[in-house]
């Protein structure tokens, strides 16, 4: 039987093969799957590589930045990239390949290219946006109805974040005296855990709605930061969650120049957390202005109606006065005519003119020859008095 070799001897052969095959320094790309900062200044990194189509891990390796290099490389990377090295970042490292029989393959990091990491974030952003567009996610959340006066707000942010404090102060110190019901759903807002943490908050909001705590909208806010700080908001799964959420989502992430996948699929994206507060308050200002205009128009209509009513009443009173005067004048004429007629028919007026009135013994006026009795007493009414004549023989002489 062949004797074989020890594990140590095998590892030495591997080391010899590695040392002879890879003598130069190499630039290597990979994703940081784990990173640990040692108190002595060393930085230990687990790198991974993935199949771009299936997302499966295809390779792993350990890398280390010794303290003498870490003291220079780590601050430099943070200054240029705007964020410290952390899990989930794609990095380009200049390494020296080392193989130890005891520890295996190790990549000794001698340099880092921060521009690669920033560029990878932008490439990922463009890739995510293209996929969301192809799947028809843009405008999906924006098609939901938003209350004209949103008063119940679910807020996803970090309680200690300055952006959250600015939003709450701006919202509460409004000039209209409007009170809002707000509920904070705390989430990590940067780092590799942020997308999953934010999605968990969306799920908690959905649970709250089912338990009878309804909301008008979801507010996702975070203050400014570096490109890498804000990279979680370009996560595909987070953007998909926002696009398909059943409530309008308002985002205020980063600075004026920032726009992320989460913004593109939201109901409305604003530049900053305070801009989100202004957007909500502007909705109230618009409604208040509308109601003020209604009140103004109603007051004006009432004033116009009152003025028209007063004018109509004045015209009616004037017309009544004119008509009443005409009626009185007309009736006065009729009375005078009747008075004239009555006076003209008054027997006393005839007597005043020298006429005499003949009447029978009963006092009834005799107006024809046939009314004179053959015998009896006739009364003759004249101006000076009444004379009684006795009739003994009637002789009628007709004209």
Image (tube, rainbow, N blue to C red):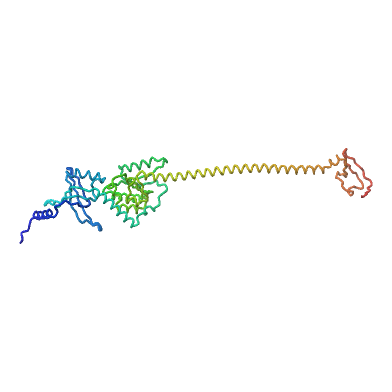
Q: Quadrant of residue 281?
A: top left
Give residue 355's position: percent from left, percent from top: 88, 42
Give residue 351's position: percent from left, percent from top: 86, 40
Q: Which residue is at the front of the view, 112 or 2?
A: 112
Q: How many marks?
A: 0
Q: Which residue is at the front of the view, 345 or 95?
A: 95
- In the picture, measured across the screen, residue 339 lies left or right of residue 164, that is right
Q: Residue at x 65, y 42 (%)?
A: 318
Is residue 188 visible to the viewer in this orientation of the structure? no
Give residue 66's position: percent from left, percent from top: 16, 45
- In the picture, measured across the screen, residue 371 lies left or right of residue 302, that is right
Residue at far top of view: 384
Residue at far front of view: 24
- In the picture, measured across the screen, residue 287 lies left or right of residue 389, that is left
Q: Quadrant of the N terminus?
A: bottom left
Q: Which residue is at the front of the view, 180 or 211?
A: 180
Residue at far bottom of view: 1
Is residue 52 visible to the viewer in this orientation of the structure? yes
Q: Residue at x 19, y 54 (%)?
A: 60
């Amino acid at each position: 039987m062949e004797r074989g070799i020890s594990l140590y001897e095998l590892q030495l052969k591997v080391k010899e093969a590695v040392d002879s095959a890879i003598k130069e320094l190499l630039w290597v790309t990979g994703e940081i799957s784990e990173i640990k900062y040692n108190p002595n200044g060393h930085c230990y990194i687990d790198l991974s590589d993935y199949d771009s189509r299936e997302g499966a891990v295809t390779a792993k390796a350990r890398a280390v930045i010794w303290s003498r290099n870490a003291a220079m490389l780590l601050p430099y990377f943070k200054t240029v990239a705007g964020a410290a090295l952390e899990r989930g970042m794609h990095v380009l490292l200049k390494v020296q390949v080392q193989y130890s029989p005891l520890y295996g393959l190790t990549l000794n990091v001698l340099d880092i290219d921060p521009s690669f990491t920033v560029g990878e974030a932008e490439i990922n952003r463009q890739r995510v946006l293209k996929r969301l567009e192809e799947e028809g996610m843009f405008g999906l959340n924006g098609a939901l109805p938003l209350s004209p006066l949103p008063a119940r707000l679910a807020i996803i942010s970090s309680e200690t974040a300055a952006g959250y404090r600015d939003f709450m102060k701006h919202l509460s110190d409004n000039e209209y005296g409007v009170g809002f019901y707000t509920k904070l759903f705390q989430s990590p807002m940067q780092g590799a855990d942020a997308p999953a943490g934010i999605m968990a908050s969306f799920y908690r909001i959905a649970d709250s709605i089912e338990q009878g705590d309804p909301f008008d909208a979801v507010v996702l806010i975070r203050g400014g930061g570096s490109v890498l700080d804000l990279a979680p908001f370009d996560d595909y799964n987070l953007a998909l969650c926002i696009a398909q959420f059943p409530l309008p989502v308002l985002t205020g992430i980063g600075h004026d120049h920032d726009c992320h996948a989460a913004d593109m699929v939201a109901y409305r994206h604003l530049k900053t957390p305070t801009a989100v507060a202004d957007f909500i308050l502007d909705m109230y200002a618009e409604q208040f202005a509308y109601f003020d205009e209604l009140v103004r128009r109603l007051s004006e209509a009432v004033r116009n109606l009152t003025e028209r009513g007063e004018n109509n009443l004045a015209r009616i009173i004037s017309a009544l006065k004119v008509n009443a005067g005409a009626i009185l004048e007309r009736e006065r004429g009729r009375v005078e005519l009747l008075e004239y007629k009555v006076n003209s028919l008054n027997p006393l007026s005839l007597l005043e003119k020298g006429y005499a009135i003949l009447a029978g013994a009963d006092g009834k006026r005799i107006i024809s020859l046939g009314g004179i009795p053959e015998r009896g007493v006739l009364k003759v009414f004249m101006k000076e008095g009444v004379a009684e004549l006795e009739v003994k023989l009637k002789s009628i002489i007709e004209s």
